[in-house]
Image (spheres, rainbow, N blue to C red):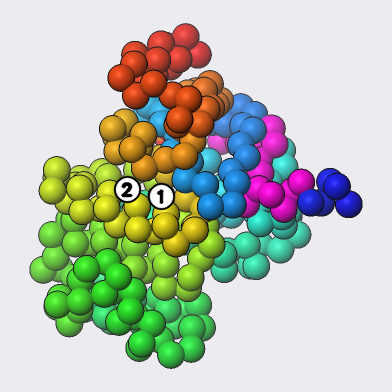
Amino acid sequence: MNNSLEKQDFDIKAEDLKKSYGNFEALRGVDLSVKNGEFYTLFGPNGAGKTTLTKLLATLTDPTSGKLSVLGIDVKKDVQKIRSTIGVISHDPYLYETLTAFENIKFFGELYGIADINERAQSVIKQVGLESRSNDLVRTFSRGMKQRLTVARAIVHEPKILLLDEPYTGLDQHGAQIFGEMLSQLKKQNRTIIMTTHNIDEGLDLSDRVGILSKGKIVYDSPTSQTDPINFKDLYISKVENS
Ligand code: ADP
C-alpha cells in the first residue's frame, strides 16, 4: 500500500534505465523521479543521451533494461494510456507546411479523437498567441511561430505531462523570450514538464529542479533553489569534463 502511494507521488519514475544501440550504451543507468507539477530541466552536451531519454519517456522506444513508470503505470503494461497523457515538443516542428495553423491542430486533434475539435483547436491556438494567424499557411510562419504552434499541437489533448527536447533550437532572442513566457504559463497550469536544453539561463529560470546528463548518466540532480545560478556554467563544465 505504502509502496503504491509512493509511486503515485511521481509522475515519472525511471530506475536504472539503460538504452543501447548495438554495442553502444547511450544511456548507462538513469534514475529520475519527477513529481506531479514539477518543471525539471536536464542539461547536457551533444551526444549525452537527452533525445534518447526523451524518446524513452515518451514511450517512442523501449529501454534495453530498467524500469519506467508514468503516472504510476508501468510502461510495459499500458503504453496507449500513457501516450494519451503526454505531449511532446522537439526542435523539429513536425507540422504540415501546406496546411493552415488551424488545419494542422485540427488534424492532430482528430488523431486523438477529441470531441469539439474545432473549438478546442481555436482555444489552443489562442493560448499560444497565434489567433490572428489561425487561417494562414504554416509555410508563411517564422521559426518562433512554428514552435509556438507545436506547443498548441502538444497540448491539444490536454496532456498532464509535457516533454520538451531542445525546444529553443533555432529560436532568435525574441522568439526564445516569447517561448519562455509560454512555458511559464504552461507551468502554472500544473503540468509536469521535463525539458532538455543547452540554454542554461532559460532552463534555470523556469525549472524547479535541474539535472545534468553526461555520457548517458545523470551526474547532477538538485532543486533549482539549491543551485547557484552564477556558478552553474562552471559546475556544468566540470561535471561534464569529469564524467
Ligand atoms: P543528445 O540528444 O544528448 O545529443 P542522443 O540521445 O541523440 O543525444 O544520442 C546519444 C548517443 O546515442 C549519441 O552518441 C548518438 O550518436 C547515439 N545514437 C542516438 N540514436 C542512435 C541510433 N538510432 N543508432 C545508433 N546510435 C544512436
Q: Nearer the viewer, residue 119 or 142?
A: 119
Is residue 137 positioned above or below 221 on the image? below
Q: How crowded is mark 2: few (under 14 residues within 10 Å), some or many (20 or more)?
A: many
Q: Quarter for ligand 1? A: top left
Is 171 one of the magenta-colored residues? no
Query: Residue 232's x, y, as percent?
Result: 36, 20
What residue is drawn where x is 28% and y is 49%? 180
Residue 7 is one of the magenta-drawn residues: yes
Q: Where is residue 71 in the image (x, y as percent from the top left)?
A: 66, 56
In the rendered structure, the answer to whether residue 225 lies left or right of residue 104 reads right
Q: How many labels does the image show?
A: 2
Distance between mark 1 and mark 2 Cα atoms = 6 Å
Residue shown at 50%/77% (left/top)?
112
Which is the main secondary structure of the residues drawn in magenta? strand
**What segment is highlighted magenta in the picture?**
6-24
Q: Nearer the viewer, residue 236 or 25?
A: 236
Q: In which quarter of the image is residue 28?
A: top right
Q: Which secondary structure, mark 1?
A: strand
Q: What element carries label 2?
A: loop
**What residue is rendered at 85% in x and 47% in y?**
2
**Residue type for callout 1:** Leu
Q: Mark 2 points at which residue?
A: 167
Q: Which mark is residue 164?
A: 1
Query: Residue 116 placed where, x, y %?
Result: 43, 90
Residue placed at 17% from the left, 51% from the top? 175
Mark 1 Cα within 10 Å, few/some/many (few <14, many 20+)? many
Q: Residue furthest front?
A: 225
Disc number placed over residue 94 in the picture, else none: none
| Amino acid type, label 2 | Pro
Quadrant assignment, res 74: bottom right
Q: In this view, does 18 lie to the left or right of 231?
A: right
Verify CB contact (< 8 Å) between mark 1 and mark 2: yes
